[in-house]
Amino acid sequence: MADLLIELFSEEIPARMQARAAADLKKMMTDGLVEAGLTYASAGAFATPRRLALSVEGVLSESPDTVEERKGPKVGAPDKAIEGFLRGAGVAKEDLQVRDDKKGQVYYAVIKKSGRPAAEIVAETLEATIRNFPWPKSMRWGTGSLKWVRPLHSILCIISDDAGANIVPLEVDGISASDTTRGHRFMAPDVIKVAHFEDYQTKLKAAHVVLSSEERADHIWNDATNQAFAQGLEVVEDNGLLAEVSGLVEWPVVLMGDIAEDFLGLPAEVLQTSMKEHQKFFSVRNPKTGRIEKFVTVANRETTDNGATILAGNQKVLFARLSDAKFFWENDLRIAKSDMAQWTDALANVTFHNKLGTEAERIERICALSEDLAAVVQADPKLAVQAAKVAKADLSSEMVYEFPELQGLMGRYYAHEAGLPQEVANACEAHYAPLGPSDDVPSEPVSVAVALADKLDKLTGFWAVDEKPTGSKDPFALRRAALGIIRLVLENDVRLGLSRYIDAQLLRHEIAQNGEDAKCAELLTDMLNEIAAHGVFGAAISTVLASAGGDAKEHIKEVEKQLPATSADLLSFFHDRLKTYLKDKGIRHDVIDACLAMDGNDDINLLVKRAEALADFLKTDDGENLLLGFKRANNILSQAEEADGVEYSYGADVKFAQEAEEKALFAALDAGEAAISPAIEAEDFAGAMSAMAALRAPIDAFFEAVQINTESQVTRRNRLNLLSRIRNLCLSVADLRKIEG
């Protein structure tokens, strides 16, 4: 057994590419080695700004001899078929063996391959890896044809064992493999000769290079937090920034600097964002005041003045950056305190989507929907509308133009400074949430109303113009919007019939698209008002059609034809997102399908409560056995109905019952109906499932003791109708026909 060490030494690799590159190097090399018959014990990949490294332990010294038998064409097959087989197998015709097969004699090729030395396989695999490496972006340099992320300077490739280390003979575009590398660019740039991985890692550290990105990150964080703690401060945690900064340095030196007093009054988020985005600085907070008062930067070298010159340069650049931020903040505050309408009016010139109009038009629709939803989420309708009107105002501000990631947050600050109610200010920030699965969900009623309206308008808009997600493509983040609505509804325990609001908002988009036709827009608005009053799309169309005429009437008929299908398709999209969400909660897709088949499936909250109760029920012995009993009853009944050409759905009478188990089942079904129906009416699904569990024993006993298909047709029909009662009662809780197994 031997160990393999590879290093690809280049100009600086972008930090964002390093982790993926290290993983790709490991995968491509180890897959290639194994495919060539060279197994190994373990492998580890590493990345610094200037190098990718791979250590593979326990590599075979050579690949084993192999024998492969390959079945070929029949004896007597056309010459071309035999010649193709010979080419593929790499053997001559006289080397073929003839063997008996089920359909006659066939040719077999026995392909023997001798093992190859590890160095030969490594050289072949590494060259293929380098030439085909999947960098997101790569470049050529000089006169060579090789492409790499940055100019590649050297290749270290050695195989070491107890006898010593041997350089793998390899040359790629004039770069020959060696057993040497270099240390830190400035602090130890000389050539270093290495013998194995431990020697390589030790000598690199002595040359001011920390090979492990995790070790660099730990050093940065520990040193930064210790320095902050010594001054009674704390470093604002940012794992993404930590990973990025650890990829910018090979020898991290942590330095803490001051923020000028002029800028300490800026919102903490503004300071943090500006320093992170432009300078890659960590923010240091005073835990007593919440203010960002200092910063941490990470240098790539030690200096004789202990970093004083580096800090001075960084503080000079930071002063210029924060001066811009301060100007934006103060200018925006003046507008916010005087008239935020300047910003909302400006959104009339900002296109949301070329088919969906401007941001200002979108705000109008969100205001209308927020008012509709306010009662559902127990919010003040006036506050909901007020919040919807200013929720996007900060998109016109200079601060958000400079730092788009601060949208919403700055809206909260500006609304607060404008003297708007706190609920309105909070909604400006919270209505974007949740953006991801780990984000908190807004809980204030006004914020919930605007957040729901914002996401529903977005979804219905893109459905209205047929810009739905396809495959893995979702450029407008519509899946995220749907999941956001689901979480808003469930985590705030909101009872919401989605179909009514989807229909209403689809109509608002239809009105926006037909604004030039005044009569048509008027009729569509009447239809919208009907839905708002009664919540029934079909009745709304009928009412409006009665007063329509001419082209407008034809357009309304076209809407009648298209809108319900669009609405149903969007609801189905919600159901698909819900399945994904509940799958992560441990609820099977067939359980969800069984509940989706029931009435009220546009009420996400109701749907989930039913699914959770059914899932819990099916985990019990009673639930599992009752499901078997239901499926047996349903199968017998379905087969009888198909054979007889009739539906056995009523008429079961206990007076025709003959067996004690049969009479007991009648009594159990009577008791079950008396308990299950009120429970379903009260949406007590756990209670309904509990009542269903009581049916398990009498159904089991019935099937054990009673023969359905008897010679007496009266008895047979009565028993089939009894099975129908079992089916109908179970289906009143959920469509158990959709449960697998």
Image (cartoon, rainbow, N blue to C red):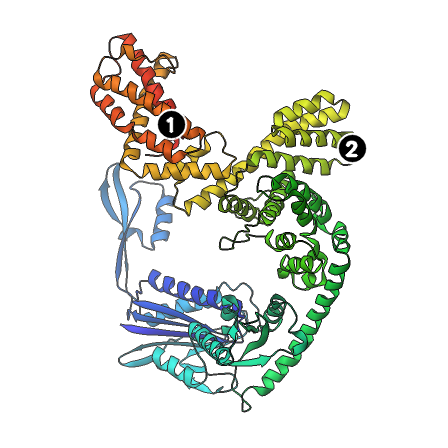
- The three-letter code of the residue at mark 2 reads Asp
Residue underneath mark 2: 517
Dot 1: within a 10 Å radius of its alpha carbon, few (fewer than 14), some, or many (20 or more) residues?
A: many
Q: Earlier in the sequence, mark 2 or mark 1?
A: 2
Please state if 307 lies on the left or on the right of 89 as rendered: right
Question: How much space separates mark 2 and mark 1, taking CA atoms?
Answer: 53 Å
The residue tagged with tag 1: helix, strand or loop?
helix
- The three-letter code of the residue at mark 1 reads Ile
Image height check: is 18 above or below 674? below
Quarter occupied by the N terminus: bottom left
Please state if 22 lies on the left or on the right of 408 as rendered: left
User: x, y (%) of residue 494?
Assistant: 52, 41
Image height check: is 116 above or below 609? below
Dot 2: within a 10 Å radius of its alpha carbon, few (fewer than 14), some, or many (20 or more) residues?
A: few
Q: Is residue 142 visible?
A: no
**Which of the pair 509/322 is nearer the observer?**
322
Quarter occupied by the C terminus: top left
Please tell me which residue is depicted at 31% across the width and 34% down the height of the picture: 623
Q: Is residue 579 visible?
A: yes
**Which of the pair 159/738 is nearer the observer?**
738
User: x, y (%) of residue 103?
Assistant: 26, 36
The residue tagged with tag 2: helix, strand or loop?
loop
Image height check: is 116 above or below 530? below
**Which of the pair 182/655 is nearer the observer?**
655
Give the quadrant of residue 119. bottom left
Please state if 588 lies on the left or on the right of 96 as rendered: right
Residue underneath mark 1: 676
Give the quadrant of residue 669. top left
Give the quadrant of residue 532. top right
**Which of the pair 99/703 is nearer the observer?**
703
